[in-house]
Amino acid sequence: MTTRTLDFKHRAAQSGETKSVVIFLHGYGADGADLLGLADPLGEHMPDTAFYAPDAPEKCLGNPMGFQWFPIPWLDGSSEEDAARGAEMAEADINGFIEMVLEVEGISPDQLIIFGFSQGTMMALRTLPKRAEPVAGLVAFSGRMLDPESFGETVVSKLPIILIHGDADDMVPIAHFDEAGQALQAAGFEVYGHIQKGTGHGIANDGLSVALSFMLDKLGLLEAQPQ
C-alpha cells in the first residue's frame, strides 16, 4: 500500500540531545498543533525527549479546518466502506511516519512513546500491536478499539498501554474504556487505566500527570527525576 507523507510539527529536546521521542496522534477534526502544546509541560520533566505531531492525511469531512485519520459515518455521512478503507490507509501512513522519526532521530522503538487522543488513540490501538517490534508504550486518551472482537487475532507485538478516559465523555462513551481494557487484557497486554472524574472528551490535569508518570517509567527516566 502506498504511504502518504504526513506534514508535521516538531519540538526539539530541551537539552539539545534527543534520547527519546513522543509522537502525538490527534483527534478527528484537529491537527498536530492541537496536541503539540503539551510538549511544554511534558518537556520540563523530559528534557531529552523530542516531540512530533503529524497532521492526519485527509481534510476532515466534518470540519474542513482540521484533519481526519479516517471518515466517521455517523458524523460526516460517509460509508462504512470509506471508513474501513481510510483506517487501513492511515495505518500505513502512521507506520511510515514512525519509521521516518526512528531514522531521523537515530533511536530504537523502545525509546519511542505514542500519545493518542480520540481518533488518534483508535489508530494507535489498531496500528502498534501489528508492528514487529513494540514501542516503549502507548498513552491512549479518550478513544476506543475499532475491532475489539477480532483484536487478539492481529497482535504481533505487545507494548505497555495506559488507557485514560473522562467519565463524562459524551463523544466517546466511557464504556469503550472498559471494552478496550478487557480486549487488551485478554490478549495478554500490560495495560493500565485511569478515569478522569468529571471530565468530558478531553485531557485533564490528573490524566496528564498519570500519562507523564507512565512515560517516564516506560522510558526508564523515573530515576532521573528530582526527589
Image: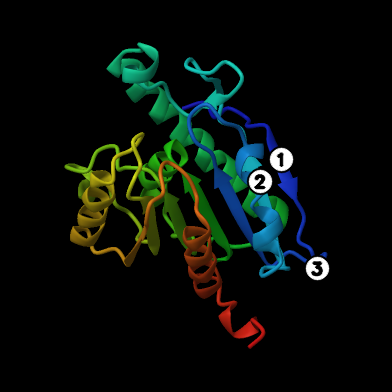
Above or below, 151 against 113 in this view is above
Q: Is residue 79 left or right of residue 64?
A: left
| Residue under label 1 | 9
Quarter residue 163 falls in: bottom left
Three-letter code for the amino acid on which mark 2 is drawn: Leu
User: Which residue of the protein is positioned furthest toward the right in this rendering?
Assistant: 16
Task: Tell me the residue at 37%/56% (across/down).
Answer: 197
CA–CA distance in space, label 2 to label 1: 8 Å
Q: Quadrant of the C terminus?
A: bottom right
Residue at far bottom of view = 227
Nearer to me, 129 or 45: 45
Comes first in the chain, label 2 or label 1: 1
Residue 113 relative to residue 77: left or right: right
* CB under 8 Å between discs 2 and 1: yes
| Three-letter code for the amino acid on which mark 1 is drawn | Lys
Residue under label 2, please give it. Answer: 36
Residue at the spot x=30%, y=42% of the render?
145
**Is residue 69 visible to the viewer in this orientation of the structure?**
yes
The percent position of residue 58, horizontal first and vertical second, equals 54, 21
What is the crowding at mark 1: few (fewer than 14 residues within 10 Å), some, or many (at least 20)? Answer: some
Q: How far across and how far down the image is residue 55, in percent? A: 61, 32
> Mark 3 sits on what residue?
15
Q: Secondary structure at mark 2?
A: helix
Q: Is residue 89 above or below residue 118?
A: above
Q: Nearer the viewer, residue 212 or 152?
A: 212
